[in-house]
Image: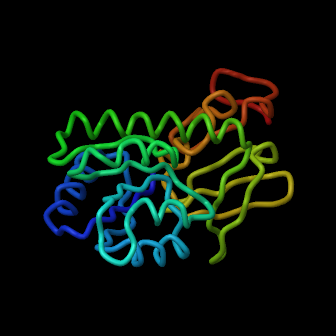
Amino acid sequence: MKCLVVDDEALSRTFMEHFIARHGGLELVGSCESACEAADVLKREPVDLLFLDIEMPEMNGLELVRSLERCPQIILVTARKEYALEAFEVAVTDYLLKPVRYTRFLQAVERAERQIRLARQASGHVFIRTEGRYVKLDLATVQWIEAEGDYVLMHTDTGRHLVHSTMKAMAERLPDDAFVRVHRSYIVRLDRVGDVAATSLTI
């Protein structure tokens, strides 16, 4: 999952960056010291998960959440308990109190992963970046996906899309009930599979 850290305290950002690197399944796309800076980053680089402080100058974290047109999963990271009710009114995924323990961080990330999987299964589409722009891709049109070095090649009913991603990261973005990774280099859509042999399958 792509994630962004937003906190005006440098030490807090460093701790979250360390947790993210330790996790292994998260990709840090940026670390911002203000909500205004984060808003600019999110316009250029949509993310799946936002680790967000609340009390920051100019714009606080909750104001940032309310301003977003496309809201990722939000994990609030704050030293203050009194914002909890207001936070859940804007449907945040979790609320972590500083100092954050790594086990509690893992629980929050797992909750975000579940929410993302459910949302993707319900929506039936993903956003991919290809040829310098973001494209909304209908998952029902995807036939299979193959590894191409540092990229994946997505074969669809309407054409092919080359996306900068690992196979592992792409598999995590797809609903488990519709896609399966049959080889380290191939992901297939289950309802497109025809004949299956010991060493091959037909789509």
Q: Could you tell me residue 120's position as x and y percent?
A: 64, 41
State the residue at coordinates (23%, 55%). Answer: 16
Name the residue rendered at 56%, 45% in the picture: 173
Please tell me in which quadrant of the rendered image residue 11 appears.
bottom left
Q: Nearer the viewer, residue 41 or 182?
A: 41
Foreground pick, 28 / 86: 86
Q: Residue at x 55, y 41 (%)?
A: 116
Q: Observer-nearest residue: 111 or 2?
A: 111
Q: Nearer the viewer, residue 94 or 139?
A: 94
Q: Is residue 97 above or below residue 36?
A: above
Q: How many numbered discs? A: 0
Q: Is residue 107 left or right of residue 97?
A: right
Task: Tell me if 87 is positioned left or right of 185 in this view.
Answer: left
Quadrant of the snapshot with the C terminus: top right
Q: Position of residue 90 (x, y in %)?
A: 52, 49
The residue at 42%/72% (across/down) is 38
